[in-house]
Amino acid sequence: MNDDLQQKLSVMRTEIDAIDAQLLELLNRRARCAQQVGEIKAQHGEAGFVYRPEREAQVLRRIRQINPGPLPDDSVTWFFREVMSACLSLEQPLGIAFLGPLGTFSESAATKHFGHAARLVPQVSIDDVFREVEAGHADYAVAPIENSTEGAIGRTLDLLLNTPLKICGEVVLRIHHNLMTHAAALADVKTVYSHAQSLAQCHEWLNRMLPGVARVSVASNSLAAQMAAADPTAAAIAGDAAAQRYELPLLASSIEDEPNNTTRFVVLGRQDSGASGRDKTSLIMSTTNQTGALSTLLAPFAEAGVSMTRLESRPARHTLWEYVFFVDVEGHRDDPAVATALAELGRRAAYLKVLGSYPVAVY
């Protein structure tokens, strides 16, 4: 290395060291401010909930808006999410229940939303995810609700009917499926393990590349990876986190049939979320079984100028051949137009439950 190049690099490295010191001071200054916020809330009797989803969404949106680059928006969003997570943990580390074991896409969704300072509480079923928060053993739940390829997650919808928990956030996670195994080649794979949803999302790839190979549905992709790690003739379909956790080499990457395969998760807690400025409201409703009843039920949204973004029917568990409808609309329940529509819907619906208003996911 010539002297001129070495001198130039030394100058830049000195500047980077100085910037790092400034960053460290600013990060600790921010942390001290976060601690003071907690102290102020405690003095006014509002220390119960340290996590405010609407405030986090506002911060992240603002950061993306003022980001001049060259760092991309996704990178600065990740960084500030982790900063907020670390600062929040100084007040109280949040316990987050999700469908485990560790290494699942649900874990990835939980850490994407709450950061790595959160206390992860993996559960063996979606039912247990809900119960863990209902019983107060965890602060929040992260549960899958729909996939862009396979549609709604029925068990989550069923549990939302009766839970006292409220939806206070959402996470949108791009799903990349990988085939991981200790086998040296596709011809050596005799069995493929994965969750039923993942097997379905990779159905055409499996038909082309592993025709005739047994496909076995298991409770989670992470469990599939654990099983494949113990059998050199088996493979698992799972995400990067599972491959890293169980030290499984990837034999094929991004094998999902749909290139934009995405899963949406809901965040559930015991609190309502305030308005963030860009929100959605989720609800469940039912109507009488008569001609035109559904169109009559949906009319209040159009009359109030509220945009409906999702309508999903689900059999009512208590009555044969009757259905409940899961609806997402734009806006917060406290917005005048949404409040007007909900009030009129309450007069028309045979059953109505507002699941929560919450910030639209900040990607």
Image (tube, grey):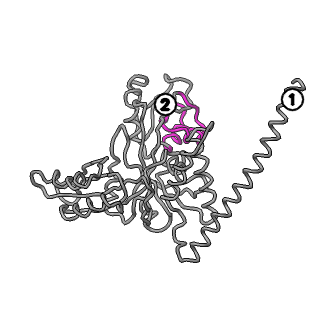
Between residues 203 and 110, which one lies in front from this camera angle?
110
At 58% from the left and 32% from the top, the residue drawn is 249
- Per the image, the residue denoted by label 1 is 6
Distance between mark 2 and mark 1 Cα atoms: 42 Å
Q: Quadrant of residue 257?
A: top left
Q: Earlier in the sequence, mark 2 or mark 1?
A: 1
Residue type (three-letter) at the residue carrying disc 2: Ser
Residue 351 belongs to magenta span: no
Between residues 118 and 357, which one lies in front from this camera angle?
357
Q: Quadrant of the N terminus?
A: top right
Residue 261: % across, % down: 42, 36
Q: Can you say whether 184 is above or below 247 in the image?
A: above
Between residues 160 and 202, which one lies in front from this camera angle?
160
- Per the image, the residue denoted by label 2 is 254
Q: Which residues are magenta?
A: 222-251
Q: Can you say whether 214 is above or below 59 in the image?
A: above
